[in-house]
Amino acid sequence: MVSIGSFVMGVSDLPRAVAFWGAALDYVPRDEVEDGWAVLVPARGQGPQLALGVSETPVREHPRSHLDLYAADAAEQAAEIERLIALGAVRVDWDLYPEDPDFVVLADPEGNRFCVIDTAHGG
């Protein structure tokens, strides 16, 4: 049986992406960052790997896949959104929000979309 080893994300500026996602997730490079490629892992404990590869493919406005970052509640979600914005993320004017969403769409400094989810929403 196979399992997911890494989520791979295309980036145009590898050092910038490594710095952002490392700070955003408290991740560190697994190995020395190579020209055009880096794999980030949790600084403490286990968790999914995030692989960053240089790509010339343009960012999609409505990507087919993205990261969901979980927050425990609305207060943590708001604090994390502000922290991520301070690191270089930006809010995305998302045109597909449902009524009363539990998520906020952000983009990393590369323009890759990701969501911050309030996991206690509606509960």
Image (cartoon, helix red, strand yellow):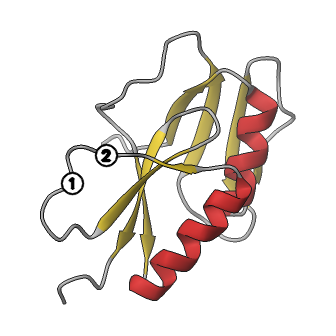
User: Where, by quadrant of the figure, is residue 80 drawn?
Assistant: bottom right
How far is disc 2 from disc 1 in space, using C-alphas? 6 Å
Q: Are marks 2 and 1 in contact (CB under 8 Å)?
A: yes
Name, please, the residue furthest toward the top.
56
The image quadrant of residue 116 is bottom left
- Give the residue displayed 44% in from the left and 48% down from the top: 114
Indicate the secondary structure of the residue bearing disc 2: loop
Q: Does residue 27 appear in the picture of this structure? A: no
> Is the N terminus in the top left, top right, bottom left or bottom right quadrant?
top left
**Looking at the image, residue 72 lies above or below residue 29:** below
- Identified by mark 1, the residue type is Tyr
Q: Position of residue 7 (x, y in %)?
A: 48, 40
- The part of the image, by quadrant, that contains residue 60 is top left
Circle 2: is it few (<14), some (14-19), or many (20+) Cα within 10 Å? few
Could you classify mark 1 by the number of other residues whose Cα lies within 10 Å: few (under 14), some (14-19), or many (20 or more)?
Answer: few
Q: Looking at the image, which is closer to me, 41 or 20?
A: 20
Eyeballing the image, is 20 above or below 16?
below
Q: Looking at the rendered structure, which numbered label has been put on residue 94? A: 2
Indicate the secondary structure of the residue bearing disc 1: loop
Nearer the observer, 2 or 43: 43
Answer left or right for 63 relative to 70: left
Q: Amino acid at mark 2?
A: Trp
Which residue is labeled 1 in the image? 97
Instruction: Pinpoint residue 65: horizontal percent, then vertical percent.
Output: 33, 37
Position in image of residue 86 (x %, y %) = 71, 61
